[in-house]
Image (cartoon, grey):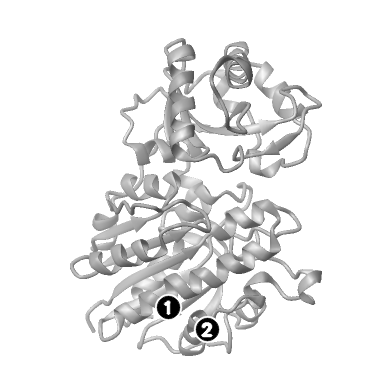
Amino acid sequence: MSASKLVFLIADGMGDWPVDELGGMTPLDAASTPHMDALAREGAVGLCRTIPDGMPPGSDIANMALLGCDPAQFHTGRGPIEAAAQGLALQTEDLVWRCNLVRVSALEPDGIMLDYSAGHIDTPTATQLIRLLQDRLGGKGADFHPGVQYRHLVVQPGKVSAPEATLGIRPPHDILDQQLGPDIQAYQQCPELWRLVQEAAELLDNGVNNSSQANAIWLWGQGRPLHLPHFTERFGRTGAVISAVDLVKGLGRAMGMAVLEVPGATGYLDTNYAGKVAAALQFLEQGDFVFLHVEAPDECGHQGSLENKVRAIADFDAQVVGPVLSGLQGRDVAVLVACDHLTPLVKRTHVSDPVPFLFRHPATVGPSTPRFTENLAASTGLILERGEDLLPWALRQSAGKP
């Protein structure tokens, strides 16, 4: 049997824990998901552990695993992945930081992280602010590079072996409504870096024309430049990624995959679902593999919004899974659906629990379930303990191999 093509649909942070307001159901269980449920009845359903032991449950780590790369071997930090997405020309000794535009009550130890996204600041406004910071502060041992919405980069040339490289700054989405003390103390260990963070906050708060909610930057996820195995050389197939977020684009670009840009892809509930689906179907006319990533469920989980998370999951099913299946009718394309990690509403951040997945291909026989939920996925007994094994497993299945 010749190998089928494969489309991998990712709903970031879709998995969750039982919610009292839903009578003990999860948002995935409560959402209307007829297309994923149909796939669960026709294919194989199980669990996959995307976060290696001892590593934090970040989307960067989890999506790296889902693309078949062992994070314990290849992961260097969130910043370097997003730098790869932008195609930044980096030197081996450069230290790359993820830079969030955030809102804090005060940039002090007893200050509170109020919003990791500065009110989901729009990209044009954010780009203007980052360029202003570069004009005022760049070139003095650090440079600012604009990204998308609240997600940006700072590069410190020649600092990969400096003390800054070992600082353990927490991701801002992990410390919502918490005090900043441990992170302020960490920044203060490196006076040059701490001065940069302070001066940026002063400019955002008082020194520039800023009508947004952003009043500080948050530097985290630092590391050396990223190097990953080439996708086609490893798997013998041509591949593409589709996402609104730079971390997925960066993983794809670092693996030599096509990065398909979709106008109106926002990483939130208002994203251009139809454009993403159209790009995937068009690529599969000639290419072999598409990794289509949707960020909205994760963002809603971080916000703690039950209503929006249920909506995001239902939208993913109705506006991504359903149209992809319709577009693939009569074509030899296998379908894999998963989330990268759980983002429980009660936690408002990621956890390391294994994620549910489903796979449909004519050569694959079960274990199936009547619906696609976390609990039913856990009941089948099919579990992959290494996240980086899921994609090779699905590719083997799509070729009719055990």
Could you say where residue 203 lies in the image, as x and y percent from the top left? Answer: 58, 16
* Residue under the point 59% across and 53% down: 299
Q: Amino acid at mark 1?
A: Gly
- Left or right: 213 in relation to 91: right
Judging depth in this view, the residue of 290 and 69 nearest the camera is: 290
Sequence-earlier tag: 1 or 2: 2
Q: Is residue 126 above or below residue 342?
A: above
Q: Is residue 67 above or below residue 246?
A: below
Local packing at callout 2 (Cα closer than 10 Å; few below 14, some 14-19, many 20+) is some
Task: Please state, as top left, top right, bottom left or bottom right, where the C terminus lies in the image.
Answer: bottom left
Local packing at callout 1 (Cα closer than 10 Å; few below 14, some 14-19, many 20+) is some
Q: Quadrant of residue 199?
A: top right
Circles 1 and 2: CB atoms closer than 8 Å: yes
* Residue under the point 24% across and 55% down: 233
Asked whether residue 349 appears in the rendered view, the answer is no
Q: Secondary structure at mark 1?
A: helix
Distance between mark 1 and mark 2 Cα atoms? 8 Å
Q: Is residue 17 above or below residue 2?
A: above
Could you say where residue 174 lies in the image, as x and y percent from the top left? Answer: 68, 44
- Left or right: 61 in relation to 231: right
Residue 65's mark?
none
Q: Secondary structure at mark 2?
A: helix
Q: Amino acid at mark 2?
A: Pro
Task: Please state, as top left, top right, bottom left or bottom right, where the N terminus lies in the image.
Answer: bottom left
The residue wearing badge 1 is 322
Q: Quadrant of residue 382?
A: bottom right
The residue wearing badge 2 is 34
